[in-house]
Image: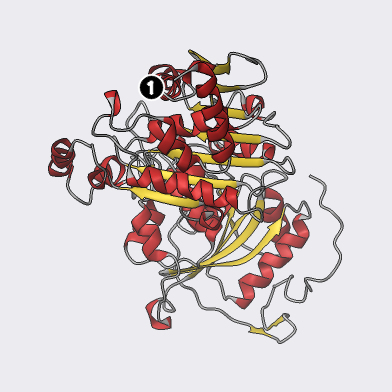
Amino acid sequence: MKASELDALRVKIAAKCKYDPLLFAEVAWPWGKGDLEDKDIRAWQSEVLDETAQHLTDPDTRFNVLRLAVASGHGIGKSAVTGMLTTWALSCWDRPRIVITANTEGQLLTKTSPEVGQWVRTSLFGDLFQTETMSIKSRARPEQHRADLIPNSEYNPEAFAGLHAEGRLVMVIVDEASAMPQVIYETILGALTDENTVLLLILMGNPTSAHGAFRECFRKNRDFWRTWNIDSRDVDGTNKEYLEEIIQEFGEDSDQVKVRVKGQFPSASQKQFIPTPYIDAAWGRHLREEQYDFAPVILTCDPAWEGDDLLIIGKRQGLRFDILEVLEKNDNDTFIAAKLAHYEERQKADAVFIDAGYGTGIYSAGTTMGRTWQLVWFGEKADDPGYRNKRAEMYARARSWLAAGGAIPKTQRLYDDLVSIETKPNEHGLVQLKSKEAMKKDGLPSPDYADTLALSFAYDVQKKHHRGTVLADGSVVDLPGDTVGHIRLNETFEPHED
């Protein structure tokens, strides 16, 4: 084919396929010849490319952010899709903004870059581009028309803040998305804001973690995503014998098989402390009143630590746990103490446990009201010598309680908090949990809801005899020595100076 004829053909294909990456993939490579002999676009790859085409060809959806997430076992051809989409964007769009990212530079250098570069070079448009180690550039305009490969370390979120190509195309492809830090995910989402611009965000990888941004694409945030769970056994060209060996070695229902073969998220990450099946079974579980009403009532209060944390009051009676109230950070300890005393009387509580971290002011205010509450220091020595501290011991008891039939409300934050609790290696062999500070560094919120549940297992509680009557207005009578009985929760209190 003459050069002029080739140029004319490429112009025609680029115009025809601008909004159709599936059609582009079908015509831009010599399927059935050379290295692609006996090869074709795989079924799942066609679905991803076609989903993109349907989104772009519709003017009503074209400029909405398209979010695609693919969780899979090994060997299904995720890098090939990255190569096809990258070649399409470079060939059919003017000055696109393309970023391909993975959690380590090694992943990009040894796997992603060579694979994507090979797809670009072998395409009908290959000679128009220069493939380098961490970039693919147009030979005509190397600085304006390019794709860049960037590690997504939590220490360089600013590298993803400038994803702008107004009126053109922005595409971000995340490889091994389970390892993507939360801060990178949030930065990418925040950058996809240009008007009248095609915006594509594609996450792919083995579903190795039971929590995190990639996991939530398939769970909490699934309404915003088009998702695929791809079983390696259902894909042409995968090593079926090896996959069967994995199944035989670890078992059909094991987390190893879920992640490496079935493309399903594990029941628990390697460090997850409370198995997801325990939480799933407890979430919204219905109990008859006689299954828990004989047990002592324990109130818990987890005060807010920082400005974005929450103050939560909870109640556990036997196998049932409820969230009574959630408040923004509040420094008025007297007000919170009065509110807690109100719940103590109405619920006829047998014990009140307060997280001592930021709860000493609430405890002191309660003491002046004649309350006998108990502070719980999460870092204090555990009663069981097998645990690093009280926090680890309380969560272990909560885990056993969930396994024994505990019931928790269908509150998403509580579910997410429980899933996010992870262990940390301890040189003395003790059970230790990742700290709140480390969780926040990983992009996870403070586990306020889960802490409220865990607090109820701080100490053993005996049911006690209650006197007093709660009136319709919330006040309490017939409690000798009770100084808070007639405090109204709508009174105005002066802020507590600490």
Residue at the image position 82 percent from the left and 71 percent from the top:
490
In the rendered image, residue 381, in percent from the top left (x then y), is placed at 45, 40
Above or below, 291 relative to 176 = below
> Which corner quadrant holds the N terminus?
top left
Residue sitting nearer the eye, 235 or 119: 119
Please name whichever residue, 23 or 440, is drawn nearer the observer in this view of the structure: 23
Residue name at image x 39 percent, y 23 percent:
115
Residue 370 is situated, as x and y percent measured from the top left of the image, at: 69, 65
Nearer to the camera, 353 or 217: 217
Quadrant for the C terminus, please.
top right
Image height of 46 relative to 461, above or below: above
Answer with the quarter of the image where residue 337 lies.
Answer: bottom right
Judged left or right of residue 83, residue 264 is left
Q: Which residue is mark 1?
A: 111
Q: Nearer the viewer, residue 86 or 247?
A: 86
Local packing at callout 1 (Cα closer than 10 Å; few below 14, some 14-19, many 20+) is: few
**Residue 462 seen in render:** yes
